[in-house]
Amino acid sequence: MKLKEKLKEKIETERERVNRLLKEHGDVKVGDITIAQVIGGMRGLKVLVTDISYLDPFEGIRYRGYTVDEVLQKLPKPKGAEMPYDEAQFYLLMTGDIPTEQEVQEIIDLFKEKRKVPNYVYKVLDSMPTQARPDVMLAVAVDTMQQESVFAKAYAENKITKQNAWEYMLEDVLNLLPKIPMIAAYIYRLKYKNNNQIPENPDLDFGGNFAHMMGIDKPYDDFSRLYFILLSDHESGNVSAHTTHLVASAWADAYYSLAAGINGLSGPLHGGATQEALKWFQELLKKLNKIPTKEELEQFCWDTLNSGQVIPGYGHAVLRKTDPRFVAQLEFGKKHLPDDKLFQLVSLLYEVAPDVLTKHGKAKNPWPNCDNITGTIQAHYGVDQYEFYPVLFDISRSMGVLSNITWDRALGYPIERPKSVTLKMLESLVQKD
Ligand code: NMX
Ligand code: MLT
């Protein structure tokens, strides 16, 4: 497999870099830690390393050094499509290189070969309570497939060394990732379409086949490709990426690690914010029974804040400007659904909310993040079952976190185990000052 050969070469070089840093400069300080950071969710602490993506607070995400715009422009696209192949984004995240048409075709073919989901997974999903949330079902499906792990099997047979661990991880990743959109579409149709399933189309790519199995016409295939690219990675400190990395750091296989990451993504302050944003817009429309004026929208923002709630899809732990992933979706919306009332409301909120949040004075970032707009576009294409939204985020995030844990094994990153202190110890630091 060319992907594996390419990774092998790159891993050799990267291992040398890591070893040199550790051996020759291991005691160089990266930063200091304050009490506020220890108590405050480690905000801003530089304690993780990944080359797969980097988030600049004022520019937004770069995937392997490429901005959102560059990625959308440079990656190969299916014939006649507006958006690139998700397989091309996966290749970029994994290798750091923009793939040629031939290189991306290898991944497309491989994913098609690997995407058939074992029957027992469908049986487990069919037997779950009807109230089970779709992202719980996805996590269960991934955990259920753990028995397929070649990494776990090889470990049990004492075949794994620090040198070769990544090869088994890669094999698991390539077996698991292509199945995620297949399982997601199955869950969607099981829960919301009377289990009226649509078989896969062997001619279609990752995003295209997902749209097809969801039963939604063009340009939903392009929106799926776009969304899966955009959310694929956001450096390693966000909850889903960090959870996946943490679990994998104890040499859990890709199945256990991804299932954990899926659970980590669910919270309303993280992946759950997409659902909260659409709910917020719908409540607003229900209350006013019309598209609000700017003044009415401003008042609704204040009502939200004064009742102690957050404006969903606004603010960010690291970003300090409008999320370029929001902008890319806004551009898609302007082209494909300019007359959609909810979409117009998203655009109007963008004119109002940053001012309100600035006056409110709490949020460090008053600008929108990617989650504010996604639900509106999904709902436009009929996916208004908002508890499904974390699953869409999971499909995308799987590409990044699975790439990351492959590199974690390749570069020999150890088990993660930060040290905790007691409040008394922190107080004693202050008394010494
Ligand atoms: N609306 C109201 N208050 C906010 C918002 C917001 N959108 N964002 C931050 N704040 C508040 C925050 O709750 C905190 O209040 P307090 O001091 O009372 O605890 C204060 O502002 C300072 O928070 P920050 O340091 O600006 O943000 P933090 O890094 O703690 O949290 C988020 C980041 C993203 C969790 C936060 O901005 C938020 O809750 N946003 C709304 C939910 C959301 O959109 N999440 C999606 C994030 C992106 N994703 O895909 O995961
Ligand atoms: C993400 O994509 O994971 C979110 O923007 C949250 C984050 O980066 O902290």
Image (cartoon, helix red, strand yellow):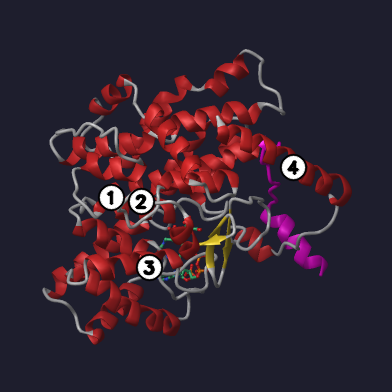
Comparing 415 with 165, the one in front is: 165
Residue 315 appears in which quarter of the rendering?
Answer: bottom left
Question: Which residue bears the numbered disc 3?
Answer: 310
The secondary structure type at the circle numbered 2 is helix
Q: Amino acid at mark 4?
A: Thr
Q: Is residue 135 depicted above or below 421 in this figure? A: above
Q: Label for residue 225? A: 2
Question: Which residue bears the numbered disc 1?
Answer: 221
Q: CA distance from mark 4 to mark 1?
A: 38 Å
The secondary structure type at the circle numbered 3 is loop
Nearer to us of marks 1 and 3 is 1
Whether label 3 lies within 8 Å of ligand 1 gets the answer yes
Question: Which residue bears the numbered disc 4?
Answer: 13
Whether label 4 lies within 8 Å of ligand 2 gets the answer no
Nearer to us of marks 3 and 2 is 2
Position of residue 115 in the picture relative to residue 344 (left or right): right
Q: Amino acid at mark 2?
A: Arg
Q: Amino acid at mark 3?
A: Val
Of callouts 4 and 1, the N-terminal one: 4
